Image: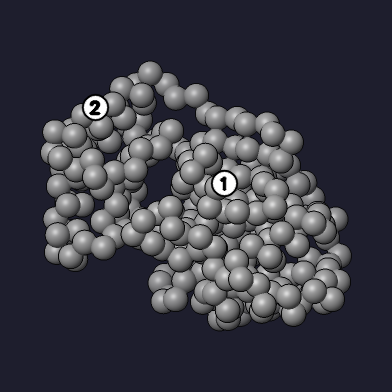
């Protein structure tokens, strides 16, 4: 694990965690808890992740939240936990809480029209095989393509989508493996801010993510906890800590539990097969 910018004292953070009134562990999914896969349905969590997250849910001393660009209905099956944690899907547009409550931001008419025009353009350009349609966006995936072809496709999408994104309702956002047309003003940072507001004072939180879409969340959590960049290779970031998955990721999660008195189960992760 490495500090980014000014030295970050992880031991001091875990001590703060122990004495906090409330705690929240906020986690991105793809690239953070699970490796990227060409077939997104095969992107299951790293070995050991399910057992450690199930332990968080069992002990219930930390608010566990998944914040993902995926739609909620596509995330819960592959997450595969014994019970569902709180989930914010589609970059925070939709929210599911463990009591079964589901909420979603209603799109304005112009936003819906913009997404429909974009869908029609993608169909006309025969790009639908690369598309992931979400409740409030369209991701165009280039992972697995030749680098030059991927760059040309992204540039083509940028030119073709200019008539949609230029209207002010929608925006194009790069991510690791493509580009996404999204509702302007909906991002993971807003989800993090909403959660922090609910936690109130004397709460400690962490947000773990890997992608450019996680930078809003890293900025939102400053002053309230720590942003943690999770990826094999470093890149410039607003996060305060960088760790490589899966081993350093598991070590961070284990350290969190141990700080709250969870040493008795530590060895179980190594033998986990999920």
Does 102 sit left or right of 176 as displayed?
A: right
Residue 171 versus residue 225 in the image, above or below: above
* Res 14 quadrant in image: bottom right
Residue at (14% x, 47% y) in the render: 156
Q: Which residue is mark 1?
A: 76
Q: Nearer the viewer, mark 1 or mark 2?
A: 1
**Secondary structure under badge 2?**
helix
Does 147 sit left or right of 213 as displayed?
A: left
Q: Nearer the viewer, residue 15 or 105?
A: 105
User: Could you tell me if residue 16 is visible in this image?
Assistant: no
**Secondary structure under badge 1?**
helix
- Please state the horizontal and vertical placement of residue 176, each as a whole percent of the image: 35, 60
Q: Earlier in the sequence, mark 1 or mark 2?
A: 1
Does 59 sit left or right of 209 as displayed?
A: right
- Please state the horizontal and vertical placement of residue 241, each as a whole percent of the image: 57, 73
- Please state the horizontal and vertical placement of residue 49, each as a whole percent of the image: 62, 66
Question: What separation in Å lies between label 1 and label 2 (alpha carbons)?
Answer: 29 Å
* Res 131 quadrant in image: top left
The quarter in which the C terminus is drawn is bottom right
Residue 72 versus residue 248 in the image, above or below: above
> Dot 1: within a 10 Å radius of its alpha carbon, few (fewer than 14), some, or many (20 or more) residues?
some
Does 139 sit left or right of 190 as displayed?
A: left
Residue at (38% x, 18% y) in the render: 109
Q: Which residue is mark 2?
A: 117
Q: Nearer the viewer, residue 168 or 255?
A: 255
């Amino acid at each position: 694990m490495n500090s980014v910018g000014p030295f970050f004292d992880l031991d001091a953070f875990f001590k703060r965690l122990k004495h906090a009134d409330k705690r929240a562990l906020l986690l991105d999914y793809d690239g953070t808890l699970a490796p990227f896969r060409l077939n997104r349905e095969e992107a299951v969590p790293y070995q050991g992740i399910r057992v450690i997250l199930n332990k968080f849910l069992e002990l219930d001393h930390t608010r566990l939240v998944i914040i993902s660009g995926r739609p909620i209905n596509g995330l819960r099956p592959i997450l595969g936990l014994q019970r569902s944690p709180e989930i914010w899907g589609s970059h925070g547009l939709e929210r599911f809480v463990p009591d079964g409550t589901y909420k979603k931001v209603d799109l304005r008419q112009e936003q819906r029209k913009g997404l429909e025009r974009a869908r029609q353009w993608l169909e006309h350009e025969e790009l639908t095989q690369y598309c992931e349609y979400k409740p409030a966006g369209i991701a165009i995936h280039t992972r697995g393509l030749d680098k030059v072809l991927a760059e040309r496709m992204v540039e083509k999408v940028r030119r073709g989508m200019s008539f949609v994104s230029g209207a002010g309702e929608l925006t194009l956002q790069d991510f690791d493996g493509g580009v996404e047309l999204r509702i302007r003003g909906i991002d993971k940072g807003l989800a993090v801010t909403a959660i922090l507001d609910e936690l109130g004072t004397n709460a400690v939180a962490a947000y773990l993510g890997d992608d450019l879409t996680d930078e809003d969340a890293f900025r939102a959590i400053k002053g309230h906890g720590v942003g943690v960049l999770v990826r094999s290779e470093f890149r410039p970031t607003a996060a305060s800590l960088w760790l490589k998955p899966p081993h350093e990721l598991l070590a961070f999660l284990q350290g969190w539990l141990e700080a709250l008195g969870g040493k008795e189960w530590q060895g179980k992760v190594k033998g986990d097969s999920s």
